[in-house]
């Protein structure tokens, strides 16, 4: 899954896709590399980020989706927690809803997903982007996240959304410390036990910078690729990344080693 942020303030790529040409060029690079899904978002969810109005998010996201859909057949995921943005995005050609709130912030999101019968990504997060990193705490990070995700899955099924339509994301960096993130990455197979494909969104995040001593998020792609290879070997179904080329190269190498006699 290749990230296409049409935001001015995302933590590592804010503002870089501020023209149609830049957006389409980046999408073309990803397609050439072998991307499977585009993930388009118009609201930064970095720690401490301020909320964006519905009107502003629509103005950012919908034209981008329309332009991408006219040029490419690659499936599109819309990264939003607002049901109206998701509805307009689906109408504009998006195929998947990626909701960091696990369908909880907007009560209209779950009925929309049921109505449209599209795949939905639900992510685990403590609090909100504005508060999530203040003091994240778990008794057992893997088991606690599994329990929360399972509860949200059950609720979605009760409301008519088939579990077969749901992808789960344990939420690297969303209400998690460095140690929490490492535990999640070590135990990806535990999340797969919930019976849904697992998405990992680790790309360029702060914990990689801490471990590698790299303050510039745009210089964390090698670390991201290394983690991607390990995640793929551990059962992750989708890797959400900024640099598709390095990620695919790393995963191919890991797969070659695994297939060796």
Image (cartoon, grey):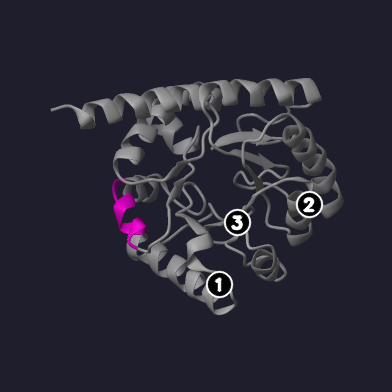
- Looking at the picture, tell me which residue is in the foreground, 114 or 226: 114
Q: Nearer the viewer, mark 3 or mark 2?
A: 2
- Find the distance from the CA under tag 1 to the CA under tag 3: 25 Å
**Residue at point 62% right, 52% down?**
129
Label 3: which secondary element? loop
Image: magenta residue range: 186-193
Q: Earlier in the sequence, mark 3 or mark 2?
A: 2
Residue 18 position, x and y percent, is 78, 27
- State whether the magenta stretch is mostly helix, strand or loop: helix
- Find the distance from the CA under tag 3 to the CA under tag 2: 32 Å
Residue 124 makes an appearance in the image: no
Pointers 1 and 3 in contact (C-beta within 8 Å): no
Q: Residues within 10 Å of mark 3 (few under 14, many from 20)?
A: some
Within the image, what quadrant is residue 84 found in?
Answer: bottom right
Residue 133 position, x and y percent, is 53, 52
Residue 80 position, x and y percent, is 68, 52
Residue 115 position, x and y percent, is 69, 68
**Residue at point 69% right, 20% down?**
25
Location of the C terminus (image quadrant): top left
**Mark 1, residue position:** 156
Label 2: which secondary element? helix
Q: Residues within 10 Å of mark 2 (few under 14, many from 20)?
A: some
- Looking at the picture, tell me which residue is in the foreground, 49 or 189: 189
**Mark 3, residue position:** 131
Count the marks: how many? 3
Within the image, what quadrant is residue 111 found in?
Answer: bottom right
Q: For this view, does 82 lie left or right of residue 221?
A: right
């Amino acid at each position: 899954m290749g990230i296409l942020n049409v935001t001015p303030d995302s933590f590592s790529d804010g503002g870089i896709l501020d023209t149609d040409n830049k957006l389409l060029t980046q999408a073309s690079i990803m397609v050439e590399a072998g991307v499977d899904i585009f993930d388009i978002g118009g609201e930064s969810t970095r720690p401490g980020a301020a909320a964006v109005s519905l009107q502003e998010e629509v103005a950012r996201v919908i034209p981008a989706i329309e332009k991408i859909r006219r040029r490419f057949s690659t499936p599109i995921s819309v990264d939003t927690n607002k049901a109206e943005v998701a509805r307009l995005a689906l109408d504009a050609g998006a195929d998947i809803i990626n909701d960091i709130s696990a369908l909880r912030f907007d009560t209209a999101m779950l009925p929309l997903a049921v109505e449209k019968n599209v795949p939905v990504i639900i992510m685990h997060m403590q609090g909100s982007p504005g508060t999530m990193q203040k003091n994240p705490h778990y008794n057992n990070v893997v088991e606690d996240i599994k329990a929360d995700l399972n509860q949200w899955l059950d609720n979605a099924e009760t409301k008519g959304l088939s579990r077969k339509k749901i992808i789960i994301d344990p939420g690297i960096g969303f209400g998690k410390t460095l140690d929490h993130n490492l535990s999640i990455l070590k135990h990806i197979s535990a999340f797969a036990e919930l019976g849904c494909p697992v998405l990992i969104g680790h790309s360029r995040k702060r914990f990689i910078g801490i471990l590698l001593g790299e303050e510039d998020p745009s210089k964390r792609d090698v670390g991201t690729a290394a983690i991607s290879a390990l995640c793929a070997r551990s059962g992750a179904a989708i890797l959400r990344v900024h640099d598709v080329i390095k990620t695919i190269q790393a995963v191919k190498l890991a797969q070659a080693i695994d297939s060796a006699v």
